[in-house]
Image: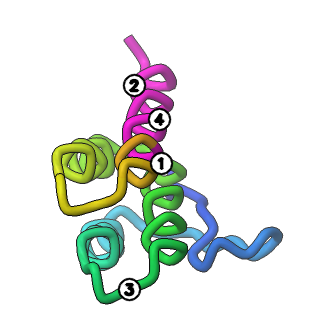
Amino acid sequence: MQPITYHPDGVAGVKRRVKMTEQPKELKKLAAITSDLEFTADLRTKAIEQLGTIGSHEALLILLDIVANERLTTKERELALEQARKIVKSSPQ
């Protein structure tokens, strides 16, 4: 399986290859950012977008948890749902 390419800091043009062994660690970090209300909404939004870019099954599950998190803003939850839809649509059938 090929490594997944995504933008680690939301900076256009800066990409990093993540090996499958590194992916769970990155996903845990992103999941923690999205659920921590101490972070700004902008940072949580970027983390949600990165989860959508990763596009794995694990990222999809995290995004669905974000959708269910009633403490987050409606905008963040809607973005998570949008990113989850993109993953489902892009997955092979």
> Which is nearer the eye, 70 or 48?
70
Residue at the disc numbered 4:
82
Pick whichever, 60 or 81, lies toward us.
Answer: 81
Residue drawn at (52%, 56%), measured in percent from left and top?
Answer: 49
Residue 29 x/y as whole percent:
30, 79
User: Quadrant of residue 32 in the image?
Assistant: bottom left
In magenta, the rendered stretch is 79-93
In the drawing, what numbered circle is on residue 43? none
N-term mark: 1 or 4: 1
CA distance for labels 2 and 1: 10 Å
Going from N to C along the chain, the mark reached first, 2 or 1, is 1
Q: Earlier in the sequence, mark 3 or mark 1?
A: 3
How far apart in space, not on screen, are marks 4 and 3 (Cα)? 21 Å
Q: Do the CB atoms of the residues marked 1 and 4 lie less than 8 Å apart?
A: yes
Which element carries disc 4, helix, strand or loop? helix
Closest to the camera, between mark 4 and mark 3, is 3
Q: Work out how far the residue at label 3 is from the one at label 1, CA to CA, in angstroms.
A: 19 Å
User: Element type at marker 1?
Assistant: helix
Circles 4, 3 touching at the beta carbon (< 8 Å): no
Residue 65: image location, x then y, percent: 18, 49
Mark 3 surroundings within 10 Å by alpha-carbon count, few (fewer than 14), some (14 through 19), many (20 or more): few
Q: Which residue does the numbered mark 3 point to in the structure image?
A: 39
Which is nearer the N-term, disc 3 or disc 2?
Answer: 3
- Please give the name of the residue rendered at 50% of the width and 77% of the height, measured from the top-left corner: 43
Q: Are marks 4 and 2 in contact (CB under 8 Å)?
A: no
Which residue type does callout 3 highlight?
Phe
Quadrant for residue 84, please give it: top left
Q: Nearer the viewer, mark 1 or mark 4?
A: 4
Going 23% across and 42% down the picture, which residue do you hit? Answer: 64
**In front of the other: 40 or 3:** 40
Q: Which residue is mark 1?
A: 52
Q: Amino acid at mark 4?
A: Glu
